[in-house]
Image (spheres, helix red, strand yellow):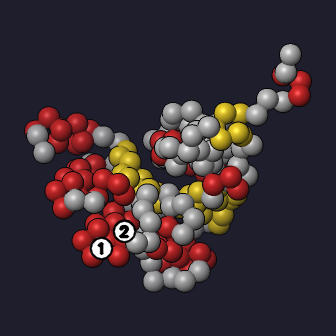
Amino acid sequence: MTDAAAELLGECGHLHVSGASLFSAHLSEMTTKAVELVKSNGGSISFDPNIRKEVARDPEVRAALETMLEYCDTFLPSGEELTLLTRATTPEAAIREILGLGVTAIVVKNGAEGATYHDANGSLSAPGYPVDELDPTGAGDCSAPPSSPAGCRAAAWRRASIMPTPAVPGQWASEARWKAPRASPSSTP
């Protein structure tokens, strides 16, 4: 890591980590250093595992993913990723286990069905936004930035982190999969 990168990370209030950045030992080491720099200066970490069950079987990848889960403040799994890095066999048990690690919030992305936010005080769900799919590439990635405490705070963040909006880069999409909003009957010429 360059001195300039370390300096920037030292000033960073929030860092989002994707599991896709943890598939090589070198990238995993660099990501861990970045996370440690942000955390050491009071910053927060959000983590989207972005993995599949077969990938998590690799011991080195699994260790890197588990390390990020322990460092993160906000965990952003999709579907089965919720239980993948725990000993739990049910979503409820996984939520308890993950919150017990010190994770502050969990936002489970459930595709077209929306998302559910969990923290020590309870859960809050929101439905997906009705859209016509154009291209699913990057669907989950567009939900991460506003799901961070840097985007909004406290109760407002709790509600905003699961509120569905049309998928555009940098907005919560409730797994809208880069879909175009459906035209309403009143908006057609």
Rendered position, 97 above or below 50: below
Q: What kind of residue is marked 2?
A: Val
Q: Residue at x 59, y 75 (%)?
A: 91
Q: Is residue 156 visible?
A: no
Measure the alpha-carbon separation of dots 1 and 2. Answer: 6 Å
Q: Residue at x 59, y 80 (%)?
A: 90
- Whether pointer 1 and pointer 2 mark residues with C-beta atoms closer than 8 Å, the reply is yes
Q: Residue at x 68, y 59 (%)?
A: 124
Q: Return the residue at label 1.
A: 58
Element assignment for label 2:
helix
Residue 53 spot, x, y in % from top left:
44, 71
Element assignment for label 1:
loop
Give the crowd class for mark 2: few <14, some 14-19, many >=20 residues within 10 Å: few
Q: Is 5 on the left-hand or right-hand side of 56?
A: left
Residue 62 spot, x, y in % from top left:
32, 72
Q: What kind of residue is marked 1?
A: Asp
Give the position of the N terminus as an image quadrant.
top left
Residue extending farthest right: 186
Rendered position, 54 above or below 168: below
Residue 3 spot, x, y in % from top left:
10, 39
Rendered position, 30 above or below 62: above
Quadrant in the rendering for residue 72:
bottom left
Name the mark on residue 55. Answer: 2
Give the position of the C terminus as an image quadrant.
top right
Q: Is 156 on the left-hand or right-hand side of 34?
A: right
Q: Is 3 on the left-hand or right-hand side of 108?
A: left
Quadrant in the rendering for residue 185:
top right
